Image (cartoon, rainbow, N blue to C red):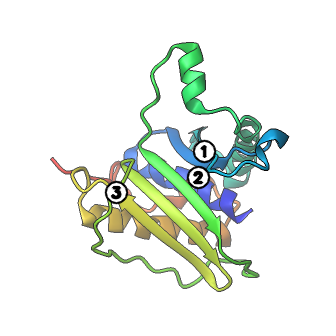
């Protein structure tokens, strides 16, 4: 699905931006798979943590299939709150730096992602994580909003990061058979700079 491609793409982006091959991010899940909850009014959303290992030598198609299987396995337990798991195991709630969310506003018949643009908008809104990506799907394309902690990142760094994300998605759609290292957007080891 488009969601899986976008999610796989942001894992590749984060790996390249940080120089790390062990990537952890979070997604929301509507925890209503139990019949007893279907007629109850309220917001039932759990945070799911997804972990991926990025092997630069692995072809994207192979990485994508493995990652997709992993996401499906995690979704099987979406009804169990992360807070409850941490409490039962007596472990600390994990530190999550990146959160990814996608909403379907309308269906799209597009097979490729074309004419993507990146721009910075000065809007004051407090981010709950270091970086939060909200993706909305419309009939004529995608809208990606990136919220971030301004005391950790410069606007230029996030704008550049989103531009790289766009380029990676374009490459994934046009040339999905390449190795992950071939989608590299920069020869520098680290491109994501935090504020001092």
Ranked by sequence position, the earlier of labels 3 and 2 is 3
* Residue most extreme to the right: 35
Ranked by sequence position, the earlier of labels 1 and 3 is 1
* Residue wearing tag 1: 57
Distance, label 1 to label 2, CA atoms, is 6 Å
Q: How many marks?
A: 3
State yes or no: discs 1 and 2 in contact (Cβ < 8 Å). Answer: yes
* Residue wearing tag 3: 148
Q: Is residue 154 left or right of residue 53?
A: left
Say if 65 sits above or below 154 in the image: above
Q: Which quadrant, please, contains the N terminus? A: bottom right
Q: Give the percent coordinates (x, y) of residue 82.
A: 58, 31
Closer to the eye: label 1 or 3: 3
Q: Give the percent coordinates (x, y) of residue 110.
A: 72, 81
SS at badge 1: loop
* Residue wearing tag 2: 180
């Amino acid at each position: 699905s488009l969601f899986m491609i976008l999610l796989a793409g942001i894992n590749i982006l984060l790996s390249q931006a940080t120089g790390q091959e062990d990537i952890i991010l979070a997604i929301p899940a509507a925890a209503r798979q139990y019949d007893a909850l279907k007629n109850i009014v309220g917001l039932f959303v759990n945070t799911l943590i997804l972990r991926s290992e990025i092997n630069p030598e692995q072809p994207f198609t192979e990485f994508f299939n493995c990652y997709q299987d992993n996401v499906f396995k995690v979704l099987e337990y979406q009804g169990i709150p992360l807070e409850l798991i941490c409490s039962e195991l007596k472990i600390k709630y994990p530190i999550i730096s990146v959160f990814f969310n996608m909403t379907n506003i309308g269906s799209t018949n597009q097979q490729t992602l074309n004419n993507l643009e990146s721009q910075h908008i000065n809007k004051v809104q407090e981010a709950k994580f270091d970086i939060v990506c909200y993706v909305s799907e419309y009939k004529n394309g995608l809208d990606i909003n990136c919220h971030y902690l301004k005391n950790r990142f410069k606007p230029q760094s996030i704008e550049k990061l989103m531009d790289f994300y766009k380029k990676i998605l374009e490459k994934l759609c046009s040339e999905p058979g390449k190795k992950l290292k071939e989608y590299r957007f920069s020869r520098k080891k680290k491109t994501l700079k935090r504020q001092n």
